[in-house]
């Protein structure tokens, strides 16, 4: 949590400190924000439940509705947001933020600042997605982890020993597989009987 003085200092830095409208919600922010969290935008307006304050920080979106007998807080992280829609009329602007579990629609009488908030949200969503996608990319394997392939079609050098693999061509890397155009086929010679039947294999290699 942060103090009320820190919240007011951040709001003054972005020109959004209000002394009247949304004062109860601003006071409540000191119990919501975490240490190091920076406020980027703060707008007053209405949503489906009535009057509320819409806050965008560097870590999440907050909608705070503080009434006399109840308190409503909507917390939406940037990695949860799937869609952001913006619409502007003559004297108002509306933003719709969608997540897989809920949707939030907020309307304010300041369409230009709301459009700037929409652009910021879109940039943060893309930054978070790019960060997650870069972390999920597979790392290249180390070169010394792959076996060294020799000229022998069925041999691979692992460490300091040559390992002969018999009958497992498909398990070897592609350069070590037998090339059918470089190795002649195996020829077997058999004697043909008098009546055309195939006899037993001929044992004399010179026949």
Image: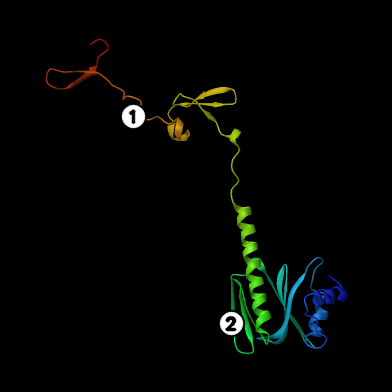
| Image quarter of residue 89 | bottom right
Image coords of residue 76 (percent x, y): 68, 72
Residue 177 lies, with reference to residue 136, above or below; the image says above
Left or right position of 185 against 25:
left
Image coords of residue 148 (percent x, y): 54, 29
Identify which residue, 68 or 54, lies in the foreground. 54
Q: Are marks 2 and 1 in contact (CB under 8 Å)?
A: no
| Image quarter of residue 16 | bottom right
| Image quarter of residue 113 | bottom right
Image coords of residue 126 (percent x, y): 62, 64
Is disc 1 placed on a helix, strand or loop?
A: loop
Q: Residue at x 25, y 10 (%)?
A: 206
**First in sequence: mark 2 vs mark 1:** 2
Left or right position of 202 against 149:
left
Q: Residue at x 60, y 57 (%)?
A: 133
Q: Residues within 10 Å of mark 1 (few under 14, many from 20)?
A: few
Is disc 2 placed on a helix, strand or loop?
A: strand
Image coords of residue 200 (percent x, y): 23, 18
Q: Residue at x 62, y 83 (%)?
A: 94
Q: Residue furthest left?
A: 195
Mark 2, residue position: 87
Residue 46 lies, with reference to residue 144, above or below; the image says below
Identify which residue, 23 or 28, lies in the foreground. 23
**Image quarter of the C terminus:** top left
**Image quarter of the N terminus:** bottom right
Mark 1, residue position: 181
Q: Residues within 10 Å of mark 2 (few under 14, many from 20)?
A: few
């Amino acid at each position: 949590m942060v103090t009320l003085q820190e919240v007011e200092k951040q709001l003054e830095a972005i020109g959004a400190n209000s002394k009247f409208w949304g004062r109860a919600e601003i006071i409540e922010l000191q119990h919501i924000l975490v240490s190091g969290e920076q406020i980027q935008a703060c707008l007053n307006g209405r949503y489906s439940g009535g009057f509320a304050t819409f806050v965008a920080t560097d870590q999440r979106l907050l909608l705070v509705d503080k009434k006399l007998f109840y308190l409503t807080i909507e917390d939406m992280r940037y990695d949860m947001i799937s869609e952001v829609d913006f619409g502007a009329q003559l004297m108002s602007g509306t933003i719709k933020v969608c997540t897989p579990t809920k949707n939030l629609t907020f309307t304010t009488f300041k369409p230009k600042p709301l459009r700037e908030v929409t652009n910021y949200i879109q940039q943060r969503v893309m930054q978070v997605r790019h960060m997650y996608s870069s972390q999920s990319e597979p790392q290249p394997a180390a070169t010394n982890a792959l076996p060294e392939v020799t000229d022998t079609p069925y041999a691979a050098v692992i460490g300091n020993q040559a390992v002969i693999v018999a009958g497992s061509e498909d398990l070897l890397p592609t350069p070590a597989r037998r090339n059918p155009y470089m190795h002649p086929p195996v020829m077997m010679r058999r004697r043909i009987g008098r009546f055309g039947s195939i006899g037993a294999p001929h044992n004399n290699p010179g026949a």
